[in-house]
Image: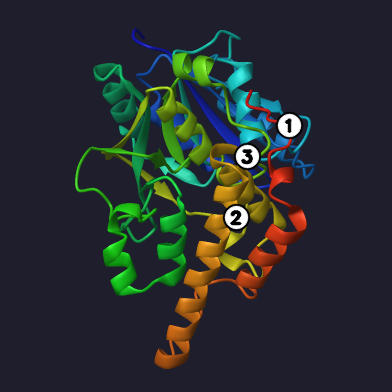
Amino acid sequence: MNGPTVLAVILNYRTAEMTLRALGAAVRAMETIAGGIVVVDNDSRDGSFERMRDAVAAEGWDREGRVRVIASGRNGGYGAGNNAGVRAGLPDGTAPDLVYVLNSDAFPEPDAITRLLDHLDAHPEVGFAGSRIVGEDGASCRSAFRFPSIAGEFEAAARTGPVSRLLARHIVAPPIPDGTACVDWLMGASVMMRRAMLDEIGLFDEGFFLYFEETDLCLRAARAGWTSVYVPESRVLHLGSVSTGMGSWRRTPRYWFDSRLRYFVKNHGPAYAAAATVAHVVGGLIWRARRLLTGQPPCDPPRFLSDLTGHALTRGFAAATGPRRTG
């Protein structure tokens, strides 16, 4: 096979069977593409590594030099696990031209990876190409976003028509584009990126355990002059939040607040982070007042606003900067 080499990275955490399903879809989608796939077990400690290693051997994918399974050695989160896969390189140990990150609960259609590769091949200024994400019902999900901002935090929390119309240019999750479109950042469930860009800006910041790491990476790329593009012809089925359990959270976990705070402080400074939190709280109070009048059901996990406020006060904005590990 000729052309650019692609390294697909699939990160597993205690979902071995689902990861193997994603791997099977990726193997089929990579049939005509030079490169290989590395599956990273993120210190599951539940037999996942052995189960996936044995399954890959049974399929003969390891002997073909197309797939290998590695252990991260520690659960440093989403960014650290994917970084381990990127650093491992192709199954023969060489560095790829392009890196494709696929979630363990995401299943690309047969031409999905090729579509991303073709777009990057035709547009050298593009650093990231992301897929159309669809749910089990076939409906498209939002996977192309604007960067978070003070105004965006207020709009997202207020959930009120007049506010959303006034701040339309700042909505973080705008309507799904009808066609190929330049965007600020892309969901990390299925995204391809240039290794040359990663060599320039660094890998995922491992200071984020989970959430906001792909937002941060795309922002660093944008500041370096690279663009991110949504490629709807690349379709990927995504079950969503299987490893994280986000859909069933009873309370928002601390690591989400840590990541959010780190993103704002690192990229915009402590004062901006404080203003963004205040904007979110004020917007959230507007939404809750509206709920009392309309009887609408809650949208946030229980005690979200108090948890957000308490985290901001006790964590301290300056502490969110910490050591910056960017790969």
Residue at the outermost left position: 178
Residue at the outermost front position: 271
In the rendered view, tell whether residue 76 sits above or below residue 250. Answer: above
Inspect the image, locate mark 1, and give the three-letter code of the amino acid beneath it. Pro
Inspect the image, locate mark 3, and give the three-letter code of the amino acid beneath it. Tyr
Residue 6 visible in this rendered orientation of the protein: no
Of residues 215 and 11, the one drawn nearer to the viewer in this rendering = 215
* Marked residue nearer the N-terminal end (2 or 1): 2
Determine which residue is flagged by label 1: 323
Quadrant where the N terminus sits is: top left
Front: mark 2 or 3: 2
Quarter of the rendering containing residue 115: top left
In the rendered view, tell whether residue 285 sits above or below residue 187. Answer: below
Determine which residue is flagged by label 3: 78
**Residue sitting at 64 percent across and 23 percent down?**
327
**Residue sitting at 33 percent across and 69 percent down?**
163
Q: Locate residue 89, reporting x and y percent.
A: 58, 15
* Marked residue nearer the N-terminal end (2 or 3): 3
Q: Give the spatial CA distance, label 3 vs label 1.
A: 17 Å
Local crowd at mark 3 within 10 Å, few (<14), some, or many (≥20)? many
